[in-house]
Image: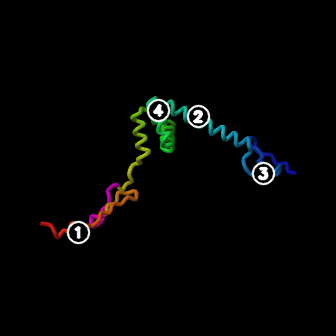
Amino acid sequence: MSNFQLPQGFKPSAGGPSGGGNGGPSPEDREAAEARARQQEEMKRTMIAAMLEPSARERLSRISLTRPQLSAQVEDLLVRMGQQGQIRGQVTDEALKGLLEQVSNPPPSKNTTPALSAGGRTKSLGNGITIQRKRDDSDSDEYDL
């Protein structure tokens, strides 16, 4: 037997010397974590509802039905901007459209000029998109008049 005492506020682990646990969190811990997650989700929803005008809120809810990932990204962006104090007043429908465009179409990389091959037949648009034109016999320069 040891006289070791845990610091105040610490709980003994289930897998410690006192008993055999399954190594995972206890049911109470899981319930507490789920309750915290639900509370955070509710706070997020309340915060977004307060930040958006009714038309913008309606647009975001319609988008969440068709593209839930895009909606989640915009919601996270709105919460982050709200916490940083970048949002003054309520977000209008037009401002929400701008945020949606910003999230769905990120700005292009530094190399914005399309690359052309030496022959002018291949054009790279970036993001793995390459256009290759077929060579036609009538394209030859020897037929210039």
Q: Is residue 42 shown left or right of residue 117?
A: right
Tell which residue pokes out farthest to the bottom in this image.
142
Q: Depth-wise, is mark 1 or mark 4 nearer the camera?
A: 1
Q: Depth-wise, is mark 3 or mark 2 nearer the camera?
A: 2
Which residue is nearer to you in this view: 111 or 1?
111
| Residue identified by numbered label 1 | 137
| Residue identified by numbered label 4 | 58
Mark 1 → mark 4, Cα distance in angstroms: 57 Å
Which residue is nearer to you in this view: 9 or 141?
141
Callout 3: few (<14), some (14-19), or many (20+) C-alpha neighbours within 10 Å? Answer: few
Coordinates of residue 132 in the picture (x, y in percent): 32, 63
Contact? badges 2 and 1 (CB < 8 Å): no
| Residue identified by numbered label 3 | 15
Tell me the residue at 78%/48% (across/down): 14
Coordinates of residue 141 in the picture (x, y in percent): 18, 68
- Looking at the rendered structure, the kind of residue marked 1 is Asp
- Looking at the rendered structure, the kind of residue marked 4 is Glu
